[in-house]
Image (cartoon, rainbow, N blue to C red):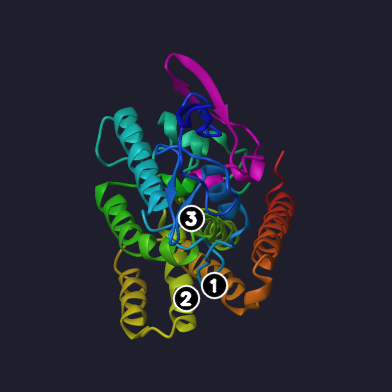
Amino acid sequence: MSDEQSAPVCYRHRNRQTYLSCSRCGKPICADCRIDAPVGFHCPDCVAEGRRTTRQARTSFGGVAGAGSAGTVTKALVGANIAVFILAALSTGTLAGLTTAGTTPLHMFGAEIGYLPGYQPGYLQGSAIFTDTHAIFDLFGRTVTAPFVAAGGYYRMITSMFLHYGLIHLGFNMLVLWMFGRALEHDLGPARFFTVYMLSGLTGSVAVYFFSYDTATAGASGAVYGLFGLLILVNRKLKRDNRSLYILIGLNLALGFFLPVSFAGHIGGLVGGLICGAILTFTPRERRGLHWVGFAVLLAALAVATFIQTGILDNQYDIV
């Protein structure tokens, strides 16, 4: 028998003869299948098995190291807010975004946290009585209805986070989200960062529903302030200086005295970010899976608080 006939063949390409072999399992591999190793070559199967059994590096907060480096979630959130603003501008015919008239198609998606006494007098059965009459809009020639939160439109507490009143409102929120979001996504990982962003915004919405339910409220400010609160505790955990952050938060809160902003939404979002930051930073490193338990408890508490407030409004204003 000749050497050519007796030469081994690659275990993945049976028509290729080879004298190379995997230094781990010994299987013959061709030049296309070989993977360079510190010593010799490895076959694709051994490399894949090694990846499955090797523990992935984690950040200080449990995210997969490097997973958030691209800032994918931050970019997606910025893109979503801009896209919704463009739709709102097209529906209103103005770059002011949402109007306070409550008559634009996109208003039904969440610009109002509560029923808003006096906001749309045509839907009131008296000067201080709520109704469950839906807001009616003409969308692409069709009549559609959308309830306010007090009448069951709880989705508004989330969708309002993506609506803005004008370019300045949108621009400021997206600038802060872009500046701080990518750094936090890198530290936390995409999943934890997205969860904290949404929970912070939702906490801001619940605060508005409790303390400012009779005002039109929209914007990503609650979630953005949540990033401030989160960053305070993340920086403390990583031993970073927070002094400039405290000044930034103080200046933003001070501007609220001169601009028509929602204090309830801002403070609520800040508190939500602090709670999420506490969950992430005070949970023992070896029990980081409890982060999700903490987030679930916070979400449940927000849901209970929302239903309690609906009951209070029902008793106070006789929602029918």
- Farthest residue in the front direction? 1
Number of residues whose C-alpha sits closer than 10 Å to that of mark 1, classed few (under 14), some (14–19) or many (20 or more): many
Q: Looking at the picture, does residue 299 appear above or below residue 154?
A: below
Residue 110 pos. (x, y %): 50, 41
The residue drawn where x is 43% and y is 62% is: 38
Which residue corresponds to mark 1?
Answer: 277
Q: Do the CB atoms of the residues marked 1 and 2 lie less than 8 Å apart?
A: yes
Disc 2 marks which residue?
Answer: 234
Query: What segment carries the magenta color?
Result: 130-159
Tag 2 or tag 3, which sits nearer the N-term? 3
Q: Characterize the local packing of mark 3: few (<14), some (14-19) or many (20 or more) Cα atoms within 10 angstroms.
A: many
Q: Quadrant of residue 251?
A: bottom left
* Pair 1/3: label in front: 3
Image coordinates for residue 285, horizontal then vertical, percent = 62, 76
Taking 264 as reference, is 287 left or right?
A: right
For label 3, the SS is helix
> What is the distance, in whole Å, between disc 1 and disc 3 at their CAs?
15 Å
From the image, which quarter does the C terminus lie in?
top right
For label 3, the residue is: 190
Amino acid beneath label 1: Gly
